[in-house]
């Protein structure tokens, strides 16, 4: 299998968004960072100037499985979203529910729909505590077990209470998987294709949604069809768990543990080298040993010997990473993503689409669009970079939100305008916030604080989603749909300002180079 050498760093890869950093010069030898702290700058220049080309050689076939099994965690998350849309229709049907408790109240229906979201919030909190203790691989194994038990409990639930418990357990798996999967992929992927692989995880989330919509449409008119919808995910849970048991641990996490006194450093270095050999598909440890040395070199420049405290997450370069990561996932949700999709069926119905009366078919249509646009983002993210996709995509989101506002306030007869705005929103979201948000939070946090910092970012993501989901109806009643979408548009403008001035370009840089640059 052919190996792929790393590309030369591009001269525009770090023009914006590095906080108090004054400038970064890029040359053929690597990246050289100049910060306000001269002593710190001097300590980091050797690392940034000396990345050897051989260190990032890799085999494509060897990079597939370390991405695929963690990405199944994203697919299972998306599947739950898609399947639940059909499951609620089946569950509440007197004809097809197959239960005596089908007559659910609005609160009970809300618990079924959002139970996994509440569980994901719990999983995000748990991740803060267990992530660095267990490691990325074991956390994903636990996520797969939580997925499996939750799916089985939900599918076999004899009553409503057991079903809610199953939804919560499945949600805990979502929280753990959405925390550990991007982190494991980021720490094990070659820098040249890291952006593509983490963005491809978003592709798997959308693919899971589409799969859930399709399965829902197949079983929606089958007695107890909702049970089959949730049970369909169990084989994927097993594949994910077995696959993660087979994969090696993250070499970066192993080395971090060793520097903190949790293992013998020379022995751990040898294990990390073997793991990296597996991940890169190289036959000789010499081809990856230099990269292991670079990781250890970066660990030696900063105080890695002790466990990170909670306060450290909000200090120094981790504070910068926290602002970048949490800001992106916050804007990802509060620009109206859950609300716009909520209105999708209504908008398409108003335009006279024949299939719009069938909610599952409408969902499949939008799922296909999301899948296509996410695929485009996956193909270009490591060529164009993160910032161009964010700026271009969020600009499109802003335009679409103001168009929707105009439709609901001034142009109610122009249903075609609402359809165009809806499709523009979905497409631009999948080009920008959808994949790039998860990509950036997995890249910017320093290694010692990555597990805890990423758990806070994931918590912000799910909390923001819950905030928008549950605040939408009261706000709609208070100010009207048109003004609400206008408000989302104003927030989208603010997110553009944030991206332009705060968010850096990380294309082509190793995680150690990103950390040193912060």
Image: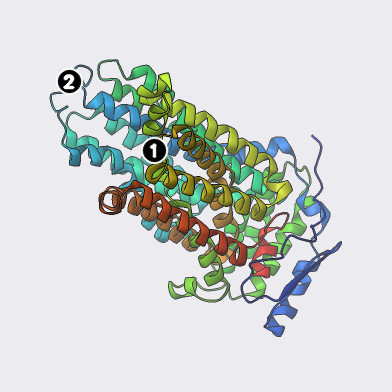
Vertical arrangement, residue 365 with respect to residue 219, above or below: below
Front residue (pair 265, 35): 35
Q: Residue 313's x, y, as percent?
A: 48, 70
Q: Residue furthest right?
A: 28
**In which quadrant is the N terminus drawn?**
top right
Disc 1 is placed on an element classified as loop
Q: Is residue 257 visible?
A: no
Which residue is under mark 1?
Answer: 412
In the visual, does 296 lie left or right of 373?
right
**In which quadrant is the C terminus drawn?**
bottom right
The image quarter in which residue 46 lies:
bottom right
Residue 94 image label = 2
Vertical arrangement, residue 78 with respect to residue 466, above or below: above
> Going 44% across and 55% down the picture, which residue do you hit?
458
The image quarter in which residue 291 lies:
bottom right
- Crowd around label 2: few <14 · some 14–19 · many ≥20 (10 Å): some
Q: Residue 375's x, y, as percent?
A: 62, 36
> Going 63% across and 77% down the picture, which residue do you hit?
20
Residue 196 image label = none
Q: Residue 311's x, y, as percent?
A: 44, 75
Q: Nearer the viewer, mark 2 or mark 1?
A: 1
Disc 2 is placed on an element classified as loop
Distance Cα–Cα, label 2 vs label 1: 36 Å
In the visual, does 337 lie left or right of 27?
left
Front residue (pair 289, 151): 151
In the visual, does 147 lie left or right of 105?
right
Vertical arrangement, residue 250 with respect to residue 49, above or below: above
Q: Circles 2 and 1: CB distance less than 8 Å?
A: no
Q: Residue 235's x, y, as percent?
A: 43, 27
Front residue (pair 291, 436): 436
Q: Earlier in the sequence, mark 2 or mark 1?
A: 2
């Amino acid at each position: 299998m052919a190996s792929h050498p790393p590309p030369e760093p591009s001269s525009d890869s770090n023009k914006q968004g590095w906080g108090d950093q004054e400038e970064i010069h890029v040359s053929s030898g690597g990246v050289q960072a100049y910060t306000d702290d001269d002593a710190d700058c001097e300590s980091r220049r050797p690392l940034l100037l000396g990345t050897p080309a051989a260190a990032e050689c890799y085999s494509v076939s060897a990079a597939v499985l370390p991405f695929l099994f963690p990405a199944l965690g994203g697919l299972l998350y998306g599947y739950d979203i898609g399947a639940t849309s059909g499951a609620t229709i089946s569950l509440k049907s007197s004809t097809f529910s197959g239960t005596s408790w089908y007559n659910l109240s609005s609160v009970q229906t809300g618990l079924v729909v959002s139970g996994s979201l509440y569980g994901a919030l719990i999983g995000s909190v748990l991740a803060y505590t267990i992530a660095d203790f267990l490691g990325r691989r074991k956390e994903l194994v636990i996520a797969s077990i939580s997925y499996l038990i939750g799916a089985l409990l939900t599918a076999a639930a004899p009553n409503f209470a057991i079903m809610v418990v199953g939804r919560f357990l499945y949600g805990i798996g979502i929280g753990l998987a959405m925390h550990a999967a991007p982190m494991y992929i980021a720490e094990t992927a070659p820098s040249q294709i890291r952006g593509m692989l983490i963005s491809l995880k978003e592709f798997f989330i959308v693919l899971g949604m589409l799969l859930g919509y399709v399965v829902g449409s197949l079983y929606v008119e089958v007695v107890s069809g909702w049970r089959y919808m949730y049970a369909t995910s169990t084989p994927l849970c097993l594949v994910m768990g077995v696959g993660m048991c087979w994969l090696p641990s993250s070499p970066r996490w192993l080395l971090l543990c060793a520097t903190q006194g949790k293992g013998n450093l020379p022995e751990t270095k040898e294990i990390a080298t073997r793991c990296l050999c597996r991940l890169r598909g190289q036959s000789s440890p010499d081809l990856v040993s230099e990269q292991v040395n670079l990781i250890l070199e970066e660990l030696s420049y900063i105080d890695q010997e002790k466990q990170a405290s909670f306060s450290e997450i909000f200090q120094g370069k981790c504070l910068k990473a926290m602002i970048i990561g949490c800001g992106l996932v916050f804007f990802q949700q509060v620009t109206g993503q859950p609300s716009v999709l909520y209105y999708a069926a209504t908008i398409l119905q108003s335009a006279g689409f024949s299939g719009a009366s069938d909610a599952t078919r409408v969902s499949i249509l939008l799922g296909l669009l999301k899948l296509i646009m996410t695929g485009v983002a996956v193909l270009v993210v490591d060529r164009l970079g993160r910032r161009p996709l964010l700026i271009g995509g969020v600009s499109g989101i802003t335009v679409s939100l103001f168009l929707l506002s105009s439709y609901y306030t001034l142009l109610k007869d122009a249903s075609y305008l609402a359809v165009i705005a809806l499709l523009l929103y979905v497409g631009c979201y999948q080009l920008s916030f959808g994949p790039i948000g998860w990509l950036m939070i997995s890249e910017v946090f320093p290694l010692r604080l990555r597990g805890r910092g990423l758990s806070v970012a994931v918590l912000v993501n799910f909390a923001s989603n819950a905030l928008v989901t549950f605040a939408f109806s009261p706000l709609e009643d208070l100010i009207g749909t048109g003004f609400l979408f206008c408000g989302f548009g104003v927030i989208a403008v603010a997110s553009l300002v944030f991206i332009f001035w705060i968010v850096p370009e990380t294309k082509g840089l190793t995680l150690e180079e990103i950390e040193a640059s912060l």
